[in-house]
Image (spheres, rainbow, N blue to C red):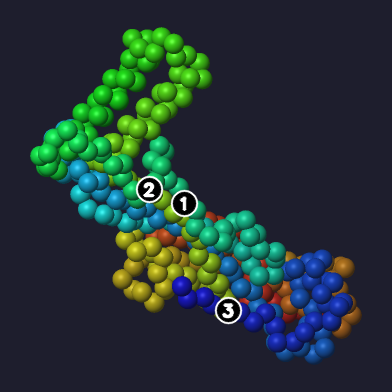
Amino acid sequence: MKKIHVLISAVALGLASVAVQAQNPTVYPLEYGESVLPLTAVKVAVTVEKETVIPGPYARYAQKFLGAMAPLSPRVSYDITGASLHVTEFAFDDAATPAGGELTVNPNVYNPTDFVKFPIDRTSLAEKSAEAMAQDAAGTIYTLRRRRFDLVSGEAGEHVYGAGMQAALEELARMEEEYVSLFMGKSYKETYTEIIEVVPEAGKTNYTVCRFSPEEGLLPDSDLGAAPVVLTLTPEQSVAAVPRSDKKSGTFVRIARWTDCRVMDGTRQLTARRLPIFQFGETVLGK
């Protein structure tokens, strides 16, 4: 994804300026005759969940043997699950933007892509059709369900109790889930976070940071075929007063204006935060 980089200042600050800015990050002393004003870069971190659906080998027989409709073709879909806002003047929270994708697999499905191998009947020389194998798999599912019912009802497992009972029920549930996946397929989810840096311009309050498609995920802002994810900036009416500790006789300071920042996906608000933006601020004489 396209990243937008920012140059905070072309002139190095003295130690005194750094100390003042550390005390109050909304104030930037313009010392040594600086003519380059400080800039604020807004970091927009967008978190997306990607879901992959893999059809089962017996998907077309799910309705016949299990009475359920199953997906017949692979499918990949995306959803924006969250967002966060930061600025470069402040410490960036790395925990809010994981470095790698996180894989979440459906419960009781050990491998998100491999399916259980149904045992071959070695007593018969005739090769079974896919439908016959699907019928055998469905029979195994109903057998596992009956065994679990017998354990719960007390019809079987008179010597199985306590932790042993719980372990047996969990193993039967796992085996059933694996066989059901032969019909209903498997799915797994991955989450990832993209960070886009936006450098606001004085007077401009709306920015398309990226675009989003449920079929393709996050896309560059230049891809007009997808819906825009928009950053809106609403500066407050006036800048904050210069604290007494920041006043120096004959020293100009740049004061950042607090701004209401919102990230919108259509009409849905993904996140909002109040941040100081130097581009919307004012230069005053700290005297």
> Would you identify the image quadrant in which residue 240 lies?
bottom right
The residue lying at 66 percent from left, 70 percent from top is 88
> Residue 237: x percent and y percent?
63, 67
Circles 2 and 1: CB distance less than 8 Å? Answer: yes
Judged by depth in the image, the label closer to the viewer, 3 or 1, is 1
Judged by depth in the image, the label closer to the viewer, 2 or 1, is 2
Is 210 on the left-hand or right-hand side of 23? left
Height in image: 231 above or below 131?
A: below
Height in image: 80 above or below 159?
A: below
Give, as a three-letter code, the residue at label 2.
Pro
Identify the disc placed on residue 112.
2
Could you tell me if residue 232 is visible in this image? Answer: no
Give, as a three-letter code, the residue at label 3.
His
Is 1 on the left-hand or right-hand side of 15? left
The residue lying at 50 percent from left, 53 percent from top is 102
Q: Secondary structure at mark 2?
A: loop
Is 211 on the left-hand or right-hand side of 195? left
Q: CA distance from mark 2 to mark 1?
A: 10 Å
Identify the disc placed on residue 103.
1
Who comes first in sequence, dot 2 or dot 1? 1
